[in-house]
Image (tube, rainbow, N blue to C red):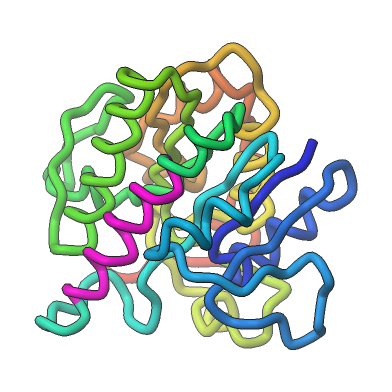
Amino acid sequence: MRILITGAQGHLGRKLTQELERDHELRLFDLHPNEDEDPRTIVGDVTVLPSVEVAMTACDAVVHLAIASGHEGEVETDAFNALRFDVNVKGTFNVLEAARRCEVGRVVYASSLMVVWGYGASEFVGPNAAARPVGTYAVTKRLGEVLCEEYVRQHGLSVVGLRIAKPIDPDDSHDVFAQQHIIRPQWIHMADLCRAFRLAVETVGIQFEIIHLVGESTRRRWDLSAAVRLLGYRPQHRLEDEGYRFEES
């Protein structure tokens, strides 16, 4: 399968490249060039539709990871929010439109758990929970989900949206949280996250699904049943059993 990864130079993009390259032909699309001069890299901007369409030509699937980078999700400034809407909303529209034009068989959209962050700490968030986004970042991710649903309804695309929690990568010496071993209950091991993206690309028979994806723990309050039932996903890591501890509430 030929797969385009947008945002391929981000940490998740690089890890997912390692996960998928064993079995698939990859194109790595990013605003920034690859420092290793990887010949699979295509430098481009998701806010420019022709750039995305050229990169996606003859692809079988696309994993859309590109986001407005530089700050965590809670940052709220006018300039950064403008960038968020450009990249997270317009960019997602461009990816979907390019997928339609190029007749791509599967779009995997990286949404965010913050889309349902507005539920109380004592509430269990089921697989069909209505969106309750908190903050502008979450709003842009929710708008991306809406665009996905409309492209499925209007144009017959096949889309899997993953509402992902923050990944922890124990192998990354620059991952401050991994090195401090202090986490939040929803955070997910990078290996489990990459495995879920692989399943979202490869699993057939899905037209449109939005799926919660969080780490397994004794304090998990986000339902993983859709990931298990639809993708065959089974988490293989429990961070709290691997030396991590939860931050104080």
Q: Is residue 58 above or below residue 223?
A: below
Residue at 68% over, 78% down: 172
90 is within the stretch colored magenta: yes
Give the camera-side residue of 39 and 145: 39
Give the camera-side residue of 212 and 27: 27
Q: Is residue 56 above or below residue 231?
A: below
Question: Would residue 84 be found to the left or right of residue 209 on screen?
Answer: left
Quadrant in which the C terminus appears: bottom left
Looking at the image, which residue sits at the far right? Answer: 22
Q: Position of residue 185 (x, y in %)?
A: 39, 54
Q: Position of residue 197 (x, y in %)?
A: 61, 42
Give the camera-side residue of 71 and 120: 71
Quadrant in which the N terminus appears: top right
Q: Quadrant of residue 209?
A: top left
| Magenta highlight: main SS | helix
**Which range of residues does the magenta coloring cover?**
81-96
Residue at 63% over, 56% down: 55
Residue at 21% over, 72% down: 74
Q: Position of residue 219 (x, y in %)?
A: 37, 45
Question: Would residue 191 be found to the left or right of residue 181 on screen?
Answer: right
Q: Position of residue 26 (x, y in %)?
A: 77, 53
Badge count: 0
Residue at 29% over, 45% down: 144
122 is within the stretch colored magenta: no
Q: Is residue 82 above or below residue 203?
A: below
